[in-house]
Image: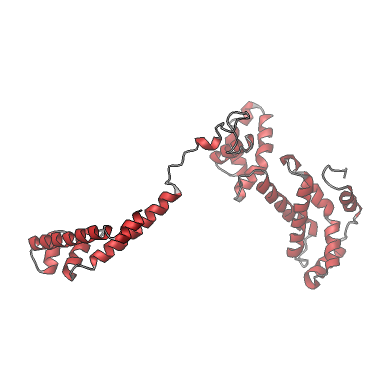
Amino acid sequence: MAYLPGVGRELVKAAMDAPFLEREEEKRLAVAWKDHKDTDALDKLASAHMRLVIALAVRFRHYGLPVADLVQEGHVGLLEAAARFAPERDVRFSTYATWWIRASIQDYVLRNWSIVRGGTSSSQKALFFNLRRLRAKLAHAPQSEAGDAFQAIAGAIGVSRADVELMNSRLAGSDVSLNSQLVEDDSSTSAERMDFLVDDRPLPDEVVEDRVDSDRRARWLADALKLLSERELRIVQERRLSESLVTLESLGDRLGISKERVRQIENRALCKLRKALTKAQETPETAAAAE
């Protein structure tokens, strides 16, 4: 393994000099770590597989991230594999650890390749790490075989065409700060990209104001309803405050009075409520809150 930029020579040399482990020695070290938490055994097991970590990390160097960081993340995956490895199964540790090392590196790439988090599902991760390779392969294929590139890639990975188009647009462009100026000059008054974003939602102070007003109106209504008689309250609730409003006639039948009498009681109750609510808005406490 040649010297890698960004990776210490000592680390590469140590990885290359570490002896390969026979199956029985590998199993013995894995058992010592799992059953007895022997840190020396873990160190020997990890050191013998650092060349595997470096080899896998190098495959992801074209994403523009430091190779040293990729190696570190791969080492985290190696330790995770050591913690989860079951020595009693007839599987070599390197075979088991490869998945954890690659998964740890891929997760690091997804977290740091862009400031926008992408590829959260397994299919999206597969799309992210295979799109460039498949796109390059289709680009060199005859037109008759390539056909619709996006559809072919979608079928190969098992995602929708829309997902392929979205990921392709993300990979084609770089991150742009919303605070970057539209015109490159030294003027501090130049417009920023943020200035052209429109948010139709109310401002935070408007949200708070509306919430306070809603609570105040609900409190006024509750106090006003206490002034009504039991029959007036029932009529107002069923005629004005219920989702399924009842007719004067049906309510009159239930109360044993005519629908005209129900209308009169309703009007009287509404008049009481109107006066009580008007008075509540004119109290000194309300006036102070309005100021």
Q: Residue at x 23, y 60 (%)?
A: 279
Is residue 9 visible to us here?
yes
Residue 77 left/right relative to 180 = right
Query: Eyeballing the image, is 250 above or below 164?
Result: below
Q: Nearer the viewer, residue 108 or 280?
A: 280
Residue 30 left/right relative to 261 = right
What x and y, as percent, mark residue 202? Answer: 42, 46
Residue 133 left/right relative to 256 = right
Is residue 92 visible to us here?
no
Q: Residue at x 80, y 73 (%)?
A: 36
What x and y, as percent, mark residue 214? Answer: 34, 57
How many numbered discs sit on the rendered protein? 0
Place residue 116 in its image quadrant. top right
Residue ranking furthest to the top: 143
What x and y, as percent, mark residue 165? Answer: 57, 37
Q: Nearer the viewer, residue 279 or 31?
A: 279
Q: Residue at x 83, y 55 (%)?
A: 49
Q: Nearer the viewer, residue 152 or 274?
A: 274
Q: Residue at x 7, y 64 (%)?
A: 258
What x and y, as percent, mark residue 77? Answer: 74, 56
Place residue 96 in its image quadrant. bottom right
Quadrant for the N terminus, please: top right
Query: Eyeballing the image, is 260 above or below 3?
Result: below
Place residue 238 in its image quadrant. bottom left
Colour option used: secondary structure
Residue 103 left/right relative to 267 = right
